[in-house]
Image (cartoon, rainbow, N blue to C red):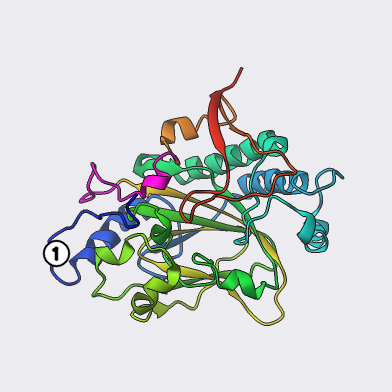
Amino acid sequence: MKKHLHITSRKKNKGSALARRIKGFSEMRRIFEHEAPGPLIAVHAIDKELLKHLQDTVATYVSKSLPFDDGPLEEKNLINAYEEFEKSILCVTPNGIIVPKRNTTLEFNNVVKALMKIVENLGISAFIKSWYIPLNVRIKFGRVHKKDLKRAHATETTHSDSWTGLSSESVIIHIPLFGDTYHNSVHCYDPPLTFQEDWLAPRLSYEEGAEIVKRYKPIDFVCPKGSVMMLDTATLHSTRRLPGCGSRISLDAAFVLRKEGSDENCDGIHPMRENEHLSPEIMSLIGKEYMFVFSDSPDEIVTSGDRFKHAANIRLTRKL
């Protein structure tokens, strides 16, 4: 299997690749009220009722993923439980993804359903070509193990998600939910005017993009709790922990953006991720007519077995 995916080339003058991205991203974000910390970033304050519903479903899912069942825990107790039982929680990846398993199938579907209500409220469904599945509920502990920082795709290393095989035409969604989301956050970087599309090709490690990162400019912005931040894949990002920070729980998801000038026949998706896509029509029916089911048992340690494939073993079924 090829280690790198060929990205469809486009004959562009300097700066035109970035201009195309800004134009396509702007077409989407003009639909909803937002703050724009960068030309390829949109931050929207989530409707309070929809936010509360998402927080409740995530809290229930994260609580059910613990090695004991005390019912849904409140924010402080939830964070404390994950810190106390970190070594015995078998569903958390080194990057902090709380991977859904058989015992959390229903709860995970409810999280997806809650997110889709927020997306519907944003009014951007027509701009979504496909969704990556599954979405991620993630815990980022205040302290990180040094060995985890040396991994090929550690989120603490500045990167684009396209470097792990996502389409270069993707938009990343980040929603900070619980814990210390200010001092333990996602830090973003603006692309230069000389941005080139081939910078977004898949890479065996984030370190391979170090020379590209040097050309980017850091953005002094932290997404506030209660908001959704959307990033074009050309906006690099990383997990940033300030000294003394606490743990945080957040949600991230991704979709391929439908925009003028994109190649409809080549999304630039790594072969290992071709089966991790779902149409927006079916995604909107998760928890209603369809469900995601997971085959791994709670006592199995999660592993993807590949640097690009998601750690969850997911299958789509119709609800009975």
**Stretch of the chain drawn in magenta:** 259-275
Crowd tier of the residue under label 1, counting other residues whose Cα lies within 10 Å: few below 14, some 14–19, many 20 or above: few
Relative depth, front residue between 191 and 154: 154
The residue positioned 39% from the left and 42% from the top of the image is 274
Picture quadrant where residue 294 is located: top right
Residue 95: x and y, percent? 59, 61
The residue positioned 37% from the left and 53% from the top of the image is 170
Q: Give the left or right position of residue 41, taking residue 4 as reference.
A: right
Q: Is residue 66 magenta?
A: no
Picture quadrant where residue 16 is located: bottom left
Residue 311: x and y, percent? 57, 48
Residue 312: x and y, percent? 58, 44
- Residue 201 can be seen, yes or no: yes
Task: Name the amino acid type tagged 1.
Answer: Lys
Which residue is identified by label 1? 12
In this rendering, the answer to whether 49 lies above or below 172 is above
Tag 1 secondary structure: loop
Q: Is residue 274 magenta?
A: yes
Q: Quadrant of the C terminus?
A: top right
The residue positioned 26% from the left and 64% from the top of the image is 198
Relative depth, front residue between 309 and 14: 309
The residue positioned 68% from the left and 64% from the top of the image is 248
Q: Main secondary structure of the magenta part?
A: loop
Residue 104: x and y, percent? 70, 38
